Amino acid sequence: LESRSTPAKMIGDDWLSIERAGMVSIGLKKDGTLWQWGCIEYVTDTQFEPCNYSPEPVQVGTDNDWVIVHADYWVRAALKNDGTLWAWGSIDSENNVAPGPPVQIGEGWRDFDLAGGNNPDYTTYLAINDDGSLWSWGYNSHGLLGLDEPDGVFRSLPEKIGVDTDWSKIF
């Protein structure tokens, strides 16, 4: 393990987006492939290591149809061009999405984001469905779910927020 005090160029120049979360970074290449490096929890469809350190990017599976990727301290999630959303890591202490290969979270999504913290219980998802409706699930802290519920409520499945169908982007 080498520590650097100045920036160093990563391998390749074909990255579309990169997110850092906790001890792992995850990147989406222009060819639609997904990559991780750092403390990798998921490597391939058949290999799982709880924290397999890799200083170089390692491809997540073999698919090349990923379009959006987001991460927080405990969870990585990515959207495919067919509208399916996939997550891996721990969404909560009940392991609703356990460490291992990506698990599908519905379909028909066109945008999403997630927010969390240093505790896997606190991840909150927001997503926009193909019909323009807004959905949320995960942990409700300070009203993040948008469902007019008290702090501490956990929703394991997506739930529609309101009736509007003109949502276009989540920032």
Image (cartoon, rainbow, N blue to C red):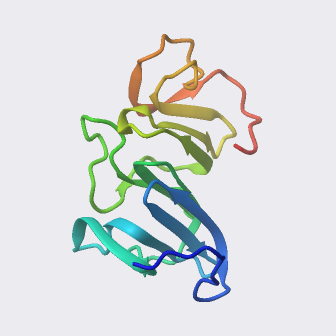
Q: Nearer the viewer, residue 67 or 81?
A: 67
Vertically, is 84 above or below 148? Answer: below
Residue 153 visible in this rendered orientation of the protein? yes
Instruction: Tell me the residue at 55%/43% (across/down).
Output: 114
Instruction: Tell me the residue at 24%/35% (across/down).
Output: 94
Residue 68 visible in this rendered orientation of the protein? no
Vertically, is 45 above or below 169? Answer: below
Give the quadrant of the C terminus.
Answer: top right
Instruction: Tell me the residue at 37%/39% (across/down).
Output: 120
Q: Is residue 152 left or right of residue 26?
A: left
Instruction: Tell me the residue at 65%/34% (across/down).
Output: 133
Q: Position of residue 168 (x, y in %)?
A: 76, 43
Q: Position of residue 124 (x, y in %)?
A: 50, 35
Q: Nearer the viewer, residue 84 or 9?
A: 9
Q: Residue furthest bottom?
A: 12
Q: Is residue 165 left or right of residue 103?
A: right
Q: Position of residue 156 (x, y in %)?
A: 37, 32
Vertically, is 14 above or below 5? Answer: below
Q: Is residue 62 left or right of residue 71?
A: left
Count of numbered marks: 0
Q: Nearer the viewer, residue 89 or 164?
A: 89
Q: Position of residue 32 (x, y in %)?
A: 57, 76
Give the quadrant of the N terminus.
Answer: bottom left
Q: Is residue 42 left or right of residue 117?
A: left
Vertically, is 25 above or below 141? Answer: below
